[in-house]
Amino acid sequence: ELYSVYGDQAPSLTTVKRWSKLFREGREEIEDEELSGRPVTETTLDNIEEIRSIVNDDPHVTIAELQEHTGLSYGTVDRILSDHLELRKITARYIPKQLTDYQQNERLR
């Protein structure tokens, strides 16, 4: 019946069974319950800018040194460097992942 109304957007039979079980057990809300565990709160704009500033001042800085200076975990520092700042380590120096033609020529020179 759901498929005839919603087509490809219809939930699977497994999902419907799980929902049905939850509501039979007394659940009344349709929103998801809050998940346990630690929320990702370390990747803030302030932390991103702090790491950007440190790397701009010293491109030879290591993740361990960034951890010590900022108090962030290794994973958070690595995520900020690679995902947010789009940097990668080459010859012990952080550089942008995508170099312009001019930058590539300068690196070769």
Image (cartoon, grey):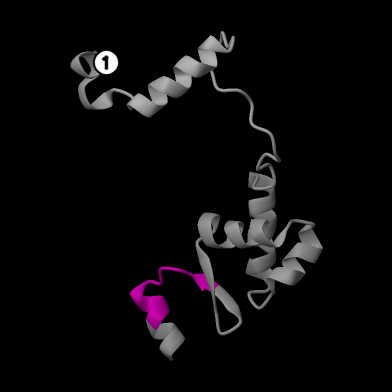
- Residue neighbourhood size for the residue with mark 1, other residues' Cα within 10 Å, grouped as few (<14), some (14–19), many (≥20): few
Specify start and end residues of the magenta stretch as a single range.
Answer: 95-104
Q: Is 42 contained in the magenta span?
A: no
Front position in the image: 48 or 16: 16
On the rendered image, what quadrant is the C terminus found in? bottom left
Under circle 1, the secondary element is: helix
Front position in the image: 38 or 46: 38
Q: Is 99 contained in the magenta span?
A: yes
The residue located at (65%, 43%) in the rendering is 40
- Could you tell whether 9 is left or right of 28 in the image? left
- Name the residue that disc number 1 marks: 2
Farthest bottom residue?
109
The residue located at (69%, 62%) in the rendering is 74
The residue located at (27%, 25%) in the rendering is 9
Residue 58 x %, y %: 68, 74
The amino acid type, in three-letter code, at marker 1 is Leu
- Could you tell whether 27 is left or right of 99 in the image? right
